[in-house]
Image (cartoon, helix red, strand yellow):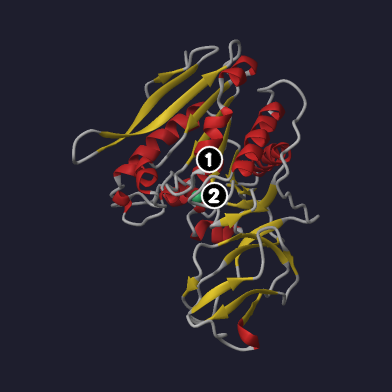
Amino acid sequence: MSLQIGNATAVPGQIVYGVFEALPLPTGGTEFFPVIVAQGRREAQPVLWLTANIHGSEYDGIAVIHRLITESLVRELRGTIVAIPTLSPAGLRTGARSPYYLNGRDPNRLFPGLPAVYDDQTNHFAPALEQAYARLFDSIQSTASYLIDLHDFGIRSIPFAFRDPVFFHSQADKPVAMKLQQTIGGMLDALGLTVINEFASNRYMDMDLHRSVSGATLNRARIPAITIEIGGQQTVHELHVQAVVVGIRNVMRWAGMLPGSPEPLPPVPVIRPGYPVRRTIHPRVPYACIVHHLVQPGDFLKAGDPVARMVDIYGRPVGPEDGLLRTRFEGFVIGLFPGIAFYPNDAIMGLAVRDHNELVVPAPPL
Ligand SMILES: [Zn+2]
């Protein structure tokens, strides 16, 4: 049986383009996800899925897919690449994180999540996009060997990968979960970028991260999946895109999908602090203010270091210490959040801090 996604059927040695019908539009016509299926001449397995732009304002992933999938790649390819350049066509058209028909909801929390939580949605009227994602997820679940979901972080960011926790459902299931987490470790090593663990497991569930593209693929379908955050939103970062294209080709070599030894990454910052880190959103401003940043993505900070200066619209300091805002934690700056005008308790950046949590954790009870 040939692999088929939407109306795109794999042809050995070729790149096939097609559509996956997503949802009907009230004005007529159909919203579709674009599908690219590239298959090597001889082998159909393994199958690497690449998905991008579920947040419509994050463009780097589209550029990565466009640069990666070429005729010369297919000549060397063993296995199949399935790529969806945008999981949010409406968000892409308007440059918005959330497509207008989701009314501000995060589309990257609409995939089928952990069974215990997701399947208990009585009287849930799923938005049309959620239904489309559920159908696409069936295709992922039945065909994917690996999945990489492509994003951007903040307005300026280092390129990095998120590593999600893997949940186990019984003691007998724990070795399976550990094996899965080990495979993800292999993928991340091959990728070669900075690795940041997702929020600790209880926060991960609270934030519905098990319903993200990679979270659902990993924890519901049990298929190795990672998220790459390429750069900042609203633009294309040429060097970061090049680095991620090389990194994905190196993952493909690790998976036996390309011949040869790993290529060196272009010169992007890669941070290996010598201990695992996880993401936090820190610090937050205590006052309404205009923020002048004093740090850059990738900077290392000690607890108590100043990260920004808070001023009013006239440029006068807000708060004590001439308006300095300090970090309470040691860590490195992941990326800066958009804008310079902030309200009380708004966070201004992402900070990677030492992680003491397990990466293989018990699932919430059924
Ligand atoms: Zn995103």
Say above or below: 324 vs 17.
below
Determine which quarter of the picture holds residue 257.
Answer: top right
| Residue at image point 55% right, 85% down | 316
Is 282 or 242 nearer to us in this picture? 242
Q: Secondary structure at mark 1?
A: helix
Farthest-out residue, front: 314
Q: Say left or right for 63 vs 298.
A: left
Q: Say left or right for 151 vs 174.
A: left
Q: Residue 175: x percent and y percent?
A: 69, 41
Q: Could one spot residue 4 in this view of the protein?
A: no
Q: Which residue is mark 1?
A: 61
Q: CA distance from mark 2 to mark 1?
A: 8 Å
| Residue at image point 49% right, 59% down | 207
Q: Residue 238: x percent and y percent?
A: 60, 42
| Residue at image point 60% right, 46% down | 170
Tell me the amino acid under the disc marked 2: Asp
| Residue at image point 60% right, 83% down | 323
Q: Which residue is mark 2?
A: 152
Q: Is mark 2 within 8 Å of ligand 1?
A: yes
Tell me the amino acid under the disc marked 1: Gly
Q: Residues within 10 Å of mark 1 (few under 14, many from 20)?
A: many
Q: Residues within 10 Å of mark 2 (few under 14, many from 20)?
A: many
